[in-house]
Image (cartoon, rainbow, N blue to C red):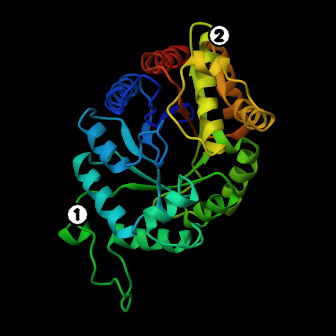
Amino acid sequence: MADALSVLDLVAVGEGHTTREALRTSARLARLAEARGFQRYWVAEHHSMPGIASSSPAVILAYLAAQTTRIRLGSGGVMLPNHAPLVVAEQFHTLEAMAPGRVDLGLGRAPGTDQSTARALRRTHGPATGDTFPADVAELLGFLDDDFPDGHPYRRVHAVPGPVQGPSGGRPAVWLLGSSGFSAQLAGRLGLPFAFAHHFAGHHTVPALELYRQSFRPSPVLAEPYTVVGVFAFAAETEEQARDQALTGALTTVRFRSGRPGLVPTPEEARSHVFTAYERKILGGWLEHAVHGTPDVVRERLDELRKRTQADELMLASNAHGLQERLTSLSLIADSYGM
């Protein structure tokens, strides 16, 4: 899998489009990714963002499981602090029963939203932090494997579906996701595969991956380190078309970070937007790590990223306005790799 490519889907909802259309596009993208030989198709958890309809990864993955037969499906990720570990174990064991041997459970420690929404999700009044993430991961693994020690308060609590019902042939593959060294180090200590969010933390990618590899300890599920790097990638027939779509995703990010989330703007709106000095700083940081252009240019830059990071897989995100354009982009990238 040295040249593996995968897909990260935010179920983008653009101006003039509906969530229903976005979900149907996700199904078409998943089927296309499967047909063209992409390794896996992940859905990211976000909340209170009008332009991103992926607030319920487990529900969307069940929908995609019914649309596909071979490609691995997973969360990129479930933001674990938002959920009780038992509920996540039950959801993903259910998905594993629907799509045996195809389910990845990627876990993140950030809320995937702003602080107010995070408090609403958790029904708490204090600040939302990932301080309990290592303990939450350990608890989730206990439920997934039905493996709490004697004396543990959850020793007689079982995730159903799950191992308590008897041999089932497997469980979801657990991954840790991150944009800093914290989860990288934890993934290494636990011997789990690690995915890094280069598309919004690109300056930290190489140090985090190095820390993961240095921290790695072989485990029953993984003998050697395994890394995925997430990157915004968009291909079109011309540089101008690709940049137009990239700019719609960039403006979406700018507005969210400025506290004004909305639908993904049209290319026309993105081109005419007058960026403030603060917005230009966000825009520059985002575009610096985004890959867009003609298929040959995109492949060249993806190959350079793979070489620089030594990633086992690249996971391509395309949070852009156009529905058909996203399908075309994935096809053009697959063509450029002879997939």
Q: Identify the secondary structure beneath mark 1.
A: loop
Furthest residue toward bottom: 151
Name the amino acid, label 1.
Answer: Pro
Cα separation between marks 1 and 2: 50 Å
Residue at figure coordinates x 61%, y 60% from the top left: 183
Q: Is residue 108 visible?
A: no
Q: Is residue 75 left or right of residue 87?
A: right
Horizontal and vertical percent for residue 39?
Answer: 44, 35
Nearer the observer, 284 or 30: 284
Nearer the observer, 257 or 156: 257
Nearer the observer, 44 or 176: 44
- The correct choice, above or below, for 262 with respect to 159 in the image is above
Horizontal and vertical percent for residue 243?
Answer: 64, 17
Name which quarter of the figure residue 241 lies in: top right
Horizontal and vertical percent for residue 253?
Answer: 62, 37
Q: Is residue 155 left or right of residue 51?
A: left
Residue at figure coordinates x 71%, y 29% from the top left: 287
Residue 240 — which label?
2
- The correct choice, above or below, for 227 with respect to 23 in the image is below
Where is mark 1, residue-wise?
Answer: 161
Chain-order first, disc 1 or disc 2: 1
Q: Identify the secondary structure beneath mark 2.
A: helix
